[in-house]
Image: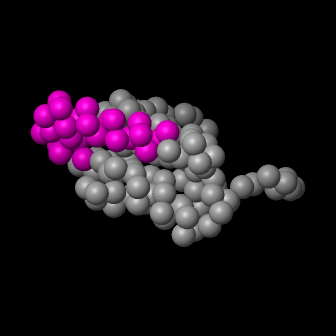
Amino acid sequence: MRYLILIPTNAGRWATLPQSERDRRLDEHIAFTRSIIASGEHIDGAVLSVPSAARTVRLRDGAVEVTDGPLTESEEYLGGYYLVECASDDRAAEIAARVPDARLGPVEVRSLKTITGLMVR
C-alpha cells in the first residue's frame, strides 16, 4: 500500500536556525531518503516552495480566478512530503518516525486510495 508522509514546518522556526543546523538537517534528510530508497520503499519526495510562492485557483461561475498566495495564511504550512510503499500502516508509521522532522513536531501519515478502474458514468 502507498502512504503519503506529510511534513509540516514553521517558517519562523526555520529562519532562526543557524546555517550549520540547516545543513545538518538537510544531511539527515538525505541519509533518511537514501535508507528508504535502499529498502525499496521510497517512491517520491519533495520540498515544497514557501506559501508566498503559491497560486490559488478557483472556478466561479465558469470563470477561472487565480490569486497569488496560499489558500490560508498560517505560521505552519506543508513543507514537504515523502511518498512510500510498504506493507502496513504500522510500517508506514515506523518510516514516518524516522523522518528527521518528527523530532521537532508531528509528521502526518495518510494512506492513498487509488482510483484505478474507477468507472465513469
Query: Is residue 30 highlighted in magenta?
Result: yes
Above or below for 54 versus 38: above
What colour scheme governs how the chains and residues are painted in the rendered image of this protein? one colour
Q: Position of residue 118 (x, y in %)?
A: 82, 56
Query: Is residue 24 highlighted in magenta?
Result: yes
Quarter of the image holding residue 117? bottom right
Is residue 103 in view from this perspective? yes
Q: Nearer the viewer, residue 51 or 98?
A: 98
Q: Nearer the viewer, residue 49 or 97?
A: 97
Left or right: where 90 falls relative to 78: right
Q: Nearer the viewer, residue 34 or 65?
A: 34
Residue visible at 17% across and 30% down in the picture: 19
Is residue 15 in view from this perspective? no
Q: Quadrant of the C terminus?
A: bottom right
Q: Main secondary structure of the magenta part?
A: helix
* Chain part drawn in magenta: 10-34
Q: Position of residue 51 (x, y in %)?
A: 34, 37
Left or right: where 16 falls relative to 106: left
Q: Position of residue 100 (x, y in %)?
A: 34, 50
Residue visible at 54% across and 69% down in the picture: 90
Residue visible at 54% across and 34% down in the picture: 64
Q: Quadrant of the N terminus?
A: bottom right
Q: Position of residue 85 (x, y in %)?
A: 63, 53
Above or below for 117 versus 14: below
Q: Nearer the viewer, residue 82 or 32?
A: 32
